[in-house]
Image (cartoon, rainbow, N blue to C red):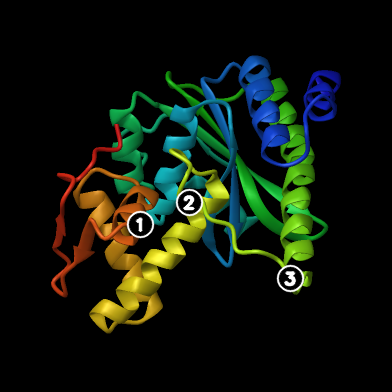
Amino acid sequence: MRSELNAAMVGSAPGTERADALCVTCVGLFDVDGAAVSLVLGGASSGTFGSSSESSRRMDEYQFTFGEGPCLDAVTSGTSVLAPDLDAPQEQRWPVLRGALLEDGIRGVFAVPIMITSVCVGALDLFRSRPGPLDGVALAGALLAAELASMPLLDLMNEARDLADREDAPVCSTDHLEDPPVEADRVEVYQATGMLISALGVDADEALVRLRAHAMATDQTASQVARSIIDRRLMLDRDDRGTTGDGGRSRR
């Protein structure tokens, strides 16, 4: 198992490609249906850095949109968070996220914290379409995969630090991309939040809450709503209702 995980890391380019390859390998090794690497900073999800598929990326992003989920709990506690059956009567955590995942056919979700030195910076999330716990071998493998996942996150942090150190760093536009990378998605959310602060006269926390609330109400992700705001196809009213020219794009 260690050799397969190492091979995925060695055979891929640094950054998101390496994280994606690790997630794909996790699906093959741990008898799960999806995997994703979440970056969590300051107690809030900062985006899905790697995933085994687009559906896994979307399910992981729900945690950013809804502001709740196992990856956030794993980072807060520094321990693995395991939910073998989201539809069990005793499972009461993450009510909004749980409903969205069940609607997408996910019954089990498992989050393992990712540590860089002594700081927890994210989580490896595993999704399964049927209920049941991770067996001992799979759980041990997930812990190893989470350890390896710190490598592409370090790549990202080093790139961000190098860019910040460059005084002549150009401003990059992603307008020409149909599907901007996840880092661009996070920038768009923060840019849209800034526009809401100015337009609504609210602080940053309330602006982000309103953006997320509209995403939930219109069945979109936070990044989809942010893109509509930036493109001026959507602006939220002071009472949290939004008007849009694209009919409120669905997340599915």
Asked whether the viewer can see residue 72, the reply is no
Q: Amino acid at mark 3?
A: Asp
Q: Position of residue 243 (x, y in %)?
A: 13, 58
Q: Which mark is residue 185?
A: 2
Q: Which mark is residue 226?
A: 1
Q: CA distance from mark 3 to mark 2?
A: 23 Å
The residue mark sitting in front, 3 or 2, is 3
| Front residue (pair 10, 85) | 10
Tell me if label 2 and label 1 are in contact, CB under 8 Å: yes
The residue mark sitting in front, 3 or 1, is 3
Q: Is residue 171 above or below residue 224?
A: below
Q: Which mark is residue 59?
A: none
**Residue at point 69% right, 57% down?**
120
* Side of 28 where 55 appears, left or right: left
In this figure, what is the number of numbered marks?
A: 3
Query: Disc 3 marks which residue?
Result: 168
* Side of 66 where 83 appears, left or right: right
Assign the C terminus to one quadrant of the image. Answer: top left
* Side of 73 where 160 appears, left or right: right
**Residue at point 48% right, 51% down?**
185
Q: CA distance from mark 3 to mark 1?
A: 28 Å
Q: Is residue 138 above or below residue 237?
A: above
Tell me if label 3 and label 1 are in contact, CB under 8 Å: no
Q: Position of residue 249 (x, y in %)?
A: 23, 41
Q: Secondary structure at mark 3?
A: loop
Q: Position of residue 24 (x, y in %)?
A: 63, 23
Q: Is residue 90 above or below residue 160?
A: above
Asked whether the viewer can see residue 199, the reply is yes
